[in-house]
Structures are given as structure tokens and as C-alpha cells.
Amino acid sequence: MSYMDEFNFWLNDDYFDQATKDELLAIRNNEGEIEERFYKELEFGTGGLRGVIGAGTNRMNIYTVRKASQGLANYIIKANGQKKGIAIAYDSRFMSPEFADEAALCMAANGIKAYVFESLRPTPELSFALRTLGCISGIVITASHNPPEYNGYKVYWEDGAQITAPKDKEIIAEVKNVTDYHTVKTMDKQEAINAGLYQVIGKEIDDAYMVELKKQIIHPDVIKEVADDIKIVYTPLCGTGNKPVRRILSELGFKNVYVVPEQENPDPKFTTLDYPNPEDPKAFTYALKLAKEKNADIVLATDPDADRLGVYVK
């Protein structure tokens, strides 16, 4: 179909909800915008999906998330992994909880149990969770350090790592084979819960993750020597790192940890940031200001899904 045919299909087919249609009606006289949203499918690559949130085939929305999930579900079934289940986490971005649920309910409708975190969690904890639970795969809804209008969908395999060759190409092929939105399965959330196909996870995984993290400490004796005196400034950059990072630092005995208040809580707009990337020195503006006030020894910053760390040392 042409991009205009796709636009009209989304606008008129009963499969798509009214909110989606209203968004498309608002651009019906803007052919350039219609073309940009519908000239291609949002590409599912080795990093999964990543794109601007909105209605259209070239956007992140509940329908493109469902479609990707159906392709992944088909691959899991072919790998005889449906009994192992899948773990799902999400970050602080717009629509992240909703996209996580859409992925979970597609999996459930395909007979694959979904273990879904009760609230936002870091990507590394998702990797830990899927291995701990014995899942065949995992999904993280995140666009990492991209601007706030973006979201994404990253796929992990049973080893806890992102998909690699040859699985990446095989999963990509399965996603591309899903060409009809009407063939994508989903189900009611309460029905999925009642059927034992949707399970909320949280504290039990958090606690086990902290235990495992502490086993990875290379020089615990050094920590004991400096924990009372060293001053640490930390910023989660409005993402998922706040609670787990503060918890592990506290449990390791660090007494002087200062969190940047303007960036402490989840904020899908990333109001205080041009670009929430701890590799960018500008992301440290607030943290370095606080570090100067506190005479801190070290400054830490994690990106929105807390799988990337930036460090300043005095």
C-alpha cells in the first residue's frame, strides 16, 4: 500500500481506537506529515524498535508494539520456549507502562507467561530477572538516552544479553512476517492474570538483585575504609536509577550520598536536560553544581534505563 492508503486504513479500520484516529484526523490536510508517519514500517533491528511516539506505521504506538510482540512470540513458540515465559521492564518515558502491558498481553494471548515489573526498573535488573526466573526472553520498554519524544523496545534472550546473531536476524524476520494487524493476538488483562499468564514482579526480584550485586564487589575492604568519609553526588537523570542506586550505595555503607533534587524523580519530559545521556558533559550541569556545594569526591550519572554510567572524579 502507498503511504496514503496506509493512512486511510488506520483512519477507517475498526481495529484502531478513536484516540489514534483523532490524532490522524488532525493531520489529514498535511500530506508531508502523513507521508513521514506512513511511508515505511518502524524498523525492527538488532536493537529492537526505537522511534517517535505517535500514530502511524513509522511511530512507536500500541499497534507497532503489538506487532513486534507478535513476531517475537512466534519466534519463542518456534523455539519451544513458551513455557519458560518472558520478563518485561520499562523506564520513565511517556507510554512506557502502556507499551509494557501491550507486549505482555500479546505474549499472554500466545500462551507465553509474562512477568511484568510493578513499576519502572533499570535494564540491568531486567537481565537479572529473566535469568533468575528462567525466562526464555525479556523486553525493556525504553529509548535509552534519546530525547523525550522517543520510546523504544529492546529484546533480550535467556542469557540476559540483548539478542545477537543469528537470533537477531531470525527474530527480525518473524516480526517482518507479521503483515496484518488483525492477526496480532491480545487479551484482557484480568483474564490474563486469572489464567496465570500475567504476573506482577517487584520486591522479591529487587532483593535478590541487591544480594547478587554485592557479590560482585571487587574490593569490599576498600569500601569499608572510605564509606564513612567519601562524598558522592548522584543523578538518575530523571530515569530508573534513583531507588536501586541509592539502595545499593546505602547497603554498601556509604554515608554521604547526595542526589540531585531536580533530577531525582522520574520525568518523561526530562525537563532539566537537553539530552539525558551521561556521556554528554552537559548532562552533569546540575550534578556538578551540587558537587561543588557539597565538596563531593565523585559524581555519578545513569541514563534513563540505567545501563549507562558517567563518572566525574575530583
Image (spheres, rainbow, N blue to C red):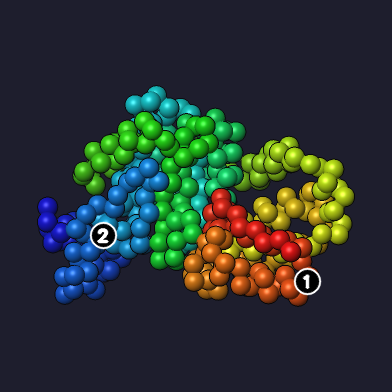
Residue type at tag 2: Gly
Q: Quadrant of residue 21?
A: bottom left
Marks 2 and 1 close (CB-CB < 8 Å): no
The image shows residue 231 at horizontal and vertical percentages of: 79, 62
Residue appearing at x 56%, y 53% in the figure: 308
Q: Residues within 10 Å of mark 2 (few under 14, many from 20)?
A: many
Give the residue drawn at x 16%, y 75%.
Answer: 29
On screen, residue 148 above or below 221: below
Label 2: state its secondary structure: loop
Relative vertical location of residue 243 with respect to residue 137 in this rendering, above or below:
below
Estimate the x, y position of residue 74 in percent, counting from the top left: 33, 33
In-front residue for pair 292/248: 292
Quarter that holds the C terminus:
bottom right
Image vertical order of residue 239 relative to residue 202, above or below: below
Measuring 38% from the left and 25% from the top, which residue is drawn there? 79
Front residue (pair 57, 293):
293
Q: Is residue 30 left or right of residue 240?
A: left
In the rendered structure, the answer to whether residue 312 lies left or right of residue 305 reads right
| Label whose residue precedes the other's in the sequence (2 or 1) | 2
Mark carried by residue 56 = 2
